[in-house]
Image (cartoon, rainbow, N blue to C red):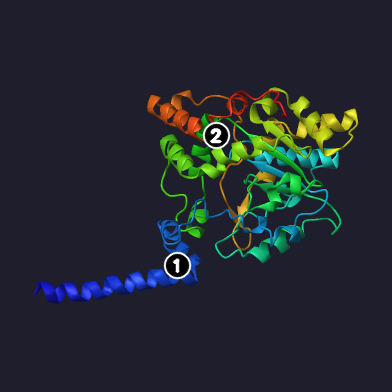
Amino acid sequence: MLGRVMRPLGALTLAVALAVGAIARFDPALFFRVPHVGFVLWVMTGSRELPPTFTTDALREEHYRKWLRHGDVVVSGMPKAGTHWTLQIVHLVRSGGDDTYGVLGDTHGNVEYRLHPRDALEQRIARESAKRASPSDSIPWFSHTAPQPDLPALQPARNPSVRYIATMRPLREVITSMVPFINDRSPEFRRLWGGFPGPHLNSEDILALMLRTPRMFFTFARAWWEVRAEPNVLLLHFHDLKKDLRGEVQRVISFLGESRTDEELELVLHKAGFAYMKANALKFVIMTGPNRDIPVTEKLVNKGQMGGAGTAFTPAMNKTLESALAQHVGDLPDLMHWWEHGGEYSRE
């Protein structure tokens, strides 16, 4: 009796396994149609990394010259380290304070971000390159990636006519900021991406994810620090932007080779301030989906506070984070100090 029951179950299990394998090989985007856990299947069946919305394929040798041009500015930000804030500053500096755009995303390209599971490489390159006012114009580019040997688009020495601005923030603050940012993902976004990023996450969950994806945090900081001497690289720290926005904006102006009148500088500072950005929050909403009609999250401009991570971190979490920092960047004490505190840094 038991054998007769188990045989069809075994055949069913085999059929399911074969179907999952076929999807993983030929059309992994189908996994995202599975509610709640589709993104888990996508990761498990292809040794893929989270988040599923980001990819580095356009940064590789065979593709990056299709979109990266002379005079472009790449703003590469550690997650929740002020990437969009920096892009707002860069746009305002380049435009003399004009912000008549609809949403900030209209002012820069982003070939790393997939609007939906079937957002193909060539489609992304064509769509984002079309944001140039003319084929010869330069534009800023959003990035969450650091220099790597197999990604020439993010190699400053190889692209001396491209300027790179990298932003960083202490990891405890990053984790504290990421908790509401991830948990505020809209229901439509979650359905689009097979349930990603999953159920409600706390700071311990975020720390665990951070340890599993070191390239976006530890490797990111180390890689940009190691190329800081390149003349076309500028490092910005979240604390410095908070403490001295005027001074940091002036650094960006000088780095980009721009010249602004006192009146234009005051306009840039006003529109780069958190009060203005929160009052005009609709300009900073990130839309996704095939028709760009799905909000990623209901709120993008947070409080932008420094510190505040103490209550979210247990002694065990602090110990885990300190151990990870020692493992990944412990041999770079100057980086460890600057990463935590900001301020001036040596280019040597």
Q: How far apart are marks 1 and 2 (CA)?
A: 33 Å
Residue type at mark 2? Answer: Val
Rendering coords of residue 139 (x, y %): 79, 50
Q: In which quarter of the image is residue 167?
A: top right
Using a 10 Å C-alpha cutoff, classify the residue at mark 1 as few (fewer than 14 neighbours), some (14 to 19) or many (20 or more).
Answer: some
Q: Residue at x 11, y 72 (%)?
A: 2
Query: Where does label 2 land, which residue?
Result: 174
Q: Residue at x 51, y 42 (%)?
A: 214
Residue type at mark 1? Answer: Ala
Rendering coords of residue 3 (x, y %): 12, 74
Quick one: SS at disc 1?
helix
Q: Which of marks 1 and 2 is nearer the N terminus?
A: 1
Disc 1 vs disc 2: which is toward the camera? 1
Rendering coords of residue 74 (x, y %): 73, 46
Horizontally, is 306 left or right of 269 in the view? Answer: left
Quick one: SS at disc 2?
helix
Query: Where does label 1 land, which residue?
Result: 24
The residue closer to the viewer here, 150 or 77, is: 150
Using a 10 Å C-alpha cutoff, classify the residue at mark 2 as few (fewer than 14 neighbours), some (14 to 19) or many (20 or more).
Answer: many
Horizontally, is 174 left or right of 205 in the view? Answer: right
**Residue furthest left in the image:** 1
Q: Is residue 46 above or below residue 180?
A: below
The residue closer to the viewer here, 170 or 298, is: 170
Q: Quadrant of residue 120?
A: bottom right
Horizontally, is 131 left or right of 293 in the view? Answer: right
